[in-house]
Image (spheres, grey):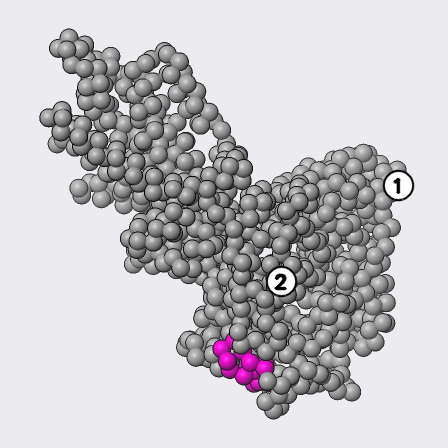
Amino acid sequence: MLRFAFVAAITFLGLIAVTFFIGRVIPVDPVLAIVGDRAPQSVVEAARRQYGFDLPLWEQFFLYVKKALTGDFGTSVLSTYPVMQDIRRVFPATLELATLGTLIGLVFGVPLGVLAAVKRGSLIDQAVRIIGLVGYSMPIFWLGLLALLVFYARLGWVEGPGRIGVAYEYTFTPITGLFLLDAAIQGDWGAFRDIFFHIILPASLLGYFSMAYISRMTRSFMLNELGQEYVVAARAKGLSEARIVWGHALRNAAVPLVTVIALSYATLLEGSVLTETVFSWPGIGLYLTNSLQNADMNAVLGATIVIGGVFIGLNLISDLLYGLLDPRTRP
Amino acid sequence: MMMGKTHGHFRLMLAGAAMSALIFASATASAETPADTLVQAWAIDDIISLDPAEAFELSTGEITGNTYDMLVKLDIADTTKVVGGLADSWTVSDDGLTYTFKLKPNLTFASGNPVTAEDVAWSFERAVKLNKTPAFIIQQFGLTADNVTEKAKAVDPTTFQFVVDKAYAPSFVLNCLTATVAAVVDSKLVKEHAATVTPSEEYKFDNDFGHGWLKTGFAGSGPFKTREWRANEAVVLERNDNYYGEKPVLARVVYRHVKESATQRLMLEKGDVDVARNLQPGDFQAVGQNADLATTATPKSTIFYFSLNQKNENLAKPEVREAFKYLVDYDTLGDTLLAGIGVVHQNFLPKGILGALEDKPYKLDVAKAKELLAKAGLPEGFSVTMDTRSGQPEQGVAEAIQQSAAQAGIKIELVPEDFKQLLTRYRARQHDIAILQWGVDYWDPNSNAETFAVNPNNADDSQLKTLAWRNAWDVPAEMQEQAKAALLERDAAKRAEMYGELQKKVREQGPFTMLWQQTEVAGLRKNVQGFKLGPTFDTNFLAPVSK
């Protein structure tokens, strides 16, 4: 436990240091974001002093870490709110999207992967692999716009960009920031439906990418399992094929698969900025990118720390799950 | 055990099916906006504050223009003139230093508080003392934190007096007072939310003048009030039922932040939004051809240009400066890349501003350019870089210029970059050529004259970093004097003439090649009436709009 905490702390410090110095090196003047291009020189210089940009680099870093240890991650120069307040606002949007996306990827990816493994070499196997490859290679930006064109504009099956429609925007009160959950808690089923139709397209898009990856890995792990001797033994014993595949082989394949899914989830949680741009989804990816383009380093560092924390947390969870699923790895 | 398992599975599947049925019951989502709300899709990620004393961005300009009032405002029928906003009438003293405004009777803020000259004075006081980006528009008249309460004061509840330090052209003073930094805030309401501050070296006052609250709050008197601003997401305006003038037809206006032109177009076609504001030429044309939709367009003051850094010894040669002006295919650009979104313009004052020239003496003429280059001692041409924002239409135009310049032997290497990055390099004078845009700070010819034709100190540490400075152009003293003189010319017609001459000189001698003046376009649903874009963002009025 102690060793884990130590490793986590070192990782964080390294992450912050690298991000900090990259941020100071990028050729964008952070004062521009604060006062704009039209400010007179005196206002520019006053802002530079106020935010400490005139101090030497290592001193700025030291000040930042000192404040961060007390929980003060600074104020975003763009929004002028404390960074953590901003992140508390944007992260749930990404969390909701990523969770739904991973669920979709999981629900479709695992069965398809199993199917491809069981019917190896057949048409189904080829189809699954091709669908996966397409999902992997297509630029998500383009696919997103295409999906909007087809499912939103032409077919009208889903709602357009944004998290919630104009009609519900002012009567709906967020509680956790996860809109689907909030609507369900309050029993506001009209809003729930509206929110669902807003989230389903971007979530499906992310789910598609997730599915592409998960199905490939599932297929790979399943093939590995199905080639084991215990499978031959089970068949000899007379167990049904379904029982062998789902009850035994998948259970064993689930062990490394859990890590894969956790990693896929973490990737989505980083905030797919392209998806968030296309769908006007106010999540952490968009926040981070916008802050980076304006050299708003407090926001960038705060968001990086949160995402780093999420990664480390998910890795820990997948390690624990590994132990749960495979008794051999328990200490 | 098997039976139990399948039974459990079955129940799960049934629940799932029921849930889906419930959700998909109304699968085709109704995509219409409420009848009393105007929904606009617009990129509003530039908004950093709603406080009129701080806001200087284009999107905020539109918000402020619809929710606050100024003493005077532009005459929409003739934008070279000014009409009364909160002020009924005004007089200028004979020495040209004192402006006295009489307020209209029975004015109220959205809160119900009456509008008095005290509010006007306090609004000016806080703008000057807070000293944010737009404060210079008021400060340039000689107002400082120390003298503002004397120079901008309420003589009586309906009379406001404004004293300037020189006998400026009255048109200049009045034009500046139409800027949003001169918006009148509800002093009673804002003072209730003022936060105490410990005075410091940088900020000598003991309270923040309500700035912290007004950054996201509202204290205006306009036809709409700002109900909410969610950064990078939405702005919601609501009708001000206490408005002293003609109340808006619509109850609400919502701005939704949508970055992509293609997405905006889809939403417009579906009816999820009533207005789309960031349409690129391709999408704009498609909208124009759609029977359910309409379009509108109005010239804005933003001028796109490219400039030559005089620190580069090749670009500093006057013949080279002139040669570049002949290496742009203005007509073709106007017909293709700029179709609908811009009009070719070759002077530094945008059309609609007092004194603006409309002549276009330059055309693509490679032979002439080559002749000039030879005279400059560069018959073989030379290599140079051009910084551009990586986006359309600038990048497309930059590529076109690269091609025409190549015909004269000038090899341009394009450097597309993020806008803020470009701005940082430009302000540090690190570019060779940069293609950029400039919008007026306030609706008066001095705004652009001061930045294109004035450069008192060309050294790196200058306190006045005009566009001329950013290109290291040592503006001839005669031009700088003319710009200063035009500022003090009280006869409007003569003033216009002086700016005409100045534009000509800058056009002929300066390192700037003006390219086009921006046209703001919007796509609308057919049922939207009364939507007209103004010459500035703060004149994009929403009150007359109905559905």
Q: For the C terminus of chain A, give its image quadrant.
A: top left
Q: Is residue B521 visible?
A: yes
Q: For the N terminus of chain A, give its image quadrant.
A: top left
Indicate which label's residue lies in the foreground, 1 or 2. Answer: 2
Observer-nearest of B36 and B279: B36
Chain of the residue under the numbered disc 2 shown in the image:
B
At 16% from the left and 28% from the top, the residue drawn is B5
**SS state under label 2:** loop
Q: Identify the amino acid type marked 1.
A: Lys
At 36% from the left and 42% from the top, the residue drawn is B23
Observer-nearest of B426 and A151: A151
- B96 horizontally vs A275: left or right: right
Structural crowding at the residue carrying mark 2, measured as other residues with C-alpha within 10 Å and reported as few (<14), some (14–19) or many (≥20): some
Q: Are marks 1 and 2 in contact (CB under 8 Å)?
A: no
Structural crowding at the residue carrying mark 1, measured as other residues with C-alpha within 10 Å and reported as few (<14), some (14–19) or many (≥20): some
At 40% from the left and 59% from the top, the residue drawn is A171
Observer-nearest of A133 and B511: A133
Q: Position of residue A262 (x, y in %)?
A: 30, 35
Chain of the residue under the numbered disc 1 shown in the image:
B
Q: Which residue is mark 2?
A: B545
Q: Is residue B272 magenta?
A: no
Highlighted magenta segment, given as a residue range: B107-122
Residue located farthest toward the bottom when viewing the structure as drawn: B156
Q: Is residue B314 visible?
A: no
Q: Identify the amino acid type marked 2.
A: Val
Q: Position of residue B344 (x, y in %)?
A: 78, 49
**SS state under label 1:** helix
* Magenta-colored segment: predominant secondary structure: loop
Q: Which mark is residue B368?
A: 1
Residue located farthest toward the top when viewing the structure as drawn: A236
Tell me which corner region of the image, top left, top right, bottom left or bottom right, holds residue A123. top left
